[in-house]
Amino acid sequence: MGSTLKIVDECASTNDFAKIMAENGALHGLVVIAETQTAGRGRMGRPWFSPRGGIWMSILTRPPPSFSFLDSLPLAGALAIAKPLSEQWNIDAKVKWPNDVVVGRRKIAGVLAESKVKGNELSFAILGIGINANMETKNYELISDTATSLFSILGGEINREDLIGAVLFEAERNFESLGGSGVVDLESLLENLDGSRGHRVRVRTSEGDIEGVVEGYEGLTTTRINTSNGVVKVEANTLLSVDYQVD
Ligand code: BT5
């Protein structure tokens, strides 16, 4: 990861920037980083606030081995953020299914996996990573009650280069493991860093809505939800949205 590094001051979305570079032949491992994004986005077109001081970056993987690789990318990406925050910076960061990193109840980072399909084949995938690093979230009305930043938690600036390096290192190992190298036991890592188990959720899937309590995972693509009718397995490729109920 980062064999080619493209750093820009401002762009609409690093995912779009990386996609254009991918369509023009950029190689596996390209990383695009922007100081600020003017149209950063989350899933389903939701806005992603991207002021200066944060870490807004996208990683190109090509060719992704399979569709199940793609379905695992959001959790693999979230783990690559939560692990170094927890182990190297001593922050109690947890992965919140399906694609968030939280500290306590507040979101500190999110990931957005997108892909390009040609015929029946995946031609490339892009993993967008947004981390609220050296910035404040309280000025953004939409997220002032739900988000936080590393700056607020640490009471000072984090070295962004160190964190970017650590996240890219973990992302590379996680991606290799999704490809079958086994270098990281992703299921155990998720077990250790999971912050969703025991939480009540309302899940929308392409196969219907489910309400219940997150019980655990099977691999990185299947989530078990304990409902009043027993355990229902949610597959990542059917997932539309997850709402956490405040309990
Ligand atoms: C995500 O979506 O969490 C994925 C975020 C991915 C952002 C990166 S930045 C680099 C790359 N380029 C992009 O354009 N995107 C990626 P989702 O789960 O849909 O969460 C979106 C919701 O999070 C919004 O509706 C807000 O409520 C909230 N939100 C927006 N900005 C936030 C921020 N900076 N911190 C915490 N929450 C935020």
Image (cartoon, rainbow, N blue to C red):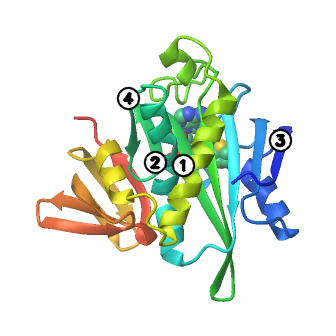
Instruction: Give me the C-alpha separation between circle 2 and circle 4.
Output: 13 Å
Question: As shown in the figure, which amino acid type bears the numbered disc 4?
Answer: Asp
Residue identifier under label 4: 92
Regarding residue 38, the answer to whether it shows in the image is: no
Question: As shown in the figure, which amino acid type bears the numbered disc 3?
Answer: Ile
- Residue displayed at 72% across by 54% down: 15
Which comes sooner in the sequence, label 4 or label 1?
4
For the residues bearing labels 1 and 2, Cβ distance under 8 angstroms: yes
Mark 3 or mark 1, which is nearer to you?
1
Instruction: Give me the C-alpha separation between circle 3 and circle 1.
Output: 20 Å
Please state the horizontal and vertical placement of residue 166, each as a whole percent of the image: 59, 40
Regarding residue 155, the answer to whether it shows in the image is: yes
Mark 4 or mark 1, which is nearer to you?
1
Which comes sooner in the sequence, label 1 or label 2?
2
Where residue 239 sits, quadrant-wise, is bottom left
Residue identifier under label 3: 7
Residue identifier under label 1: 170
Instruction: Give me the C-alpha separation between circle 3 and circle 4.
Output: 29 Å
Towards the viewer: 85 or 238: 85
- Residue displayed at 42% across by 33% down: 86
> Where the C terminus falls, by quadrant?
top left
Specify the farthest residue to the right.
Answer: 24
- Left or right: where does residue 53 sit relative to residue 222? right
- Residue displayed at 63% across by 63% down: 114
> Where the N terminus falls, by quadrant?
bottom right
Which comes sooner in the sequence, label 2 or label 4?
2
| Secondary-structure class at tag 3 | strand
Towards the viewer: 202 or 222: 222
Question: As shown in the figure, which amino acid type bears the numbered disc 1?
Answer: Glu
Mark 4 Cα shell of 10 Å, populated few (<14), some (14-19), many (≥20): some
Residue 160: which numbered mark, if any?
none
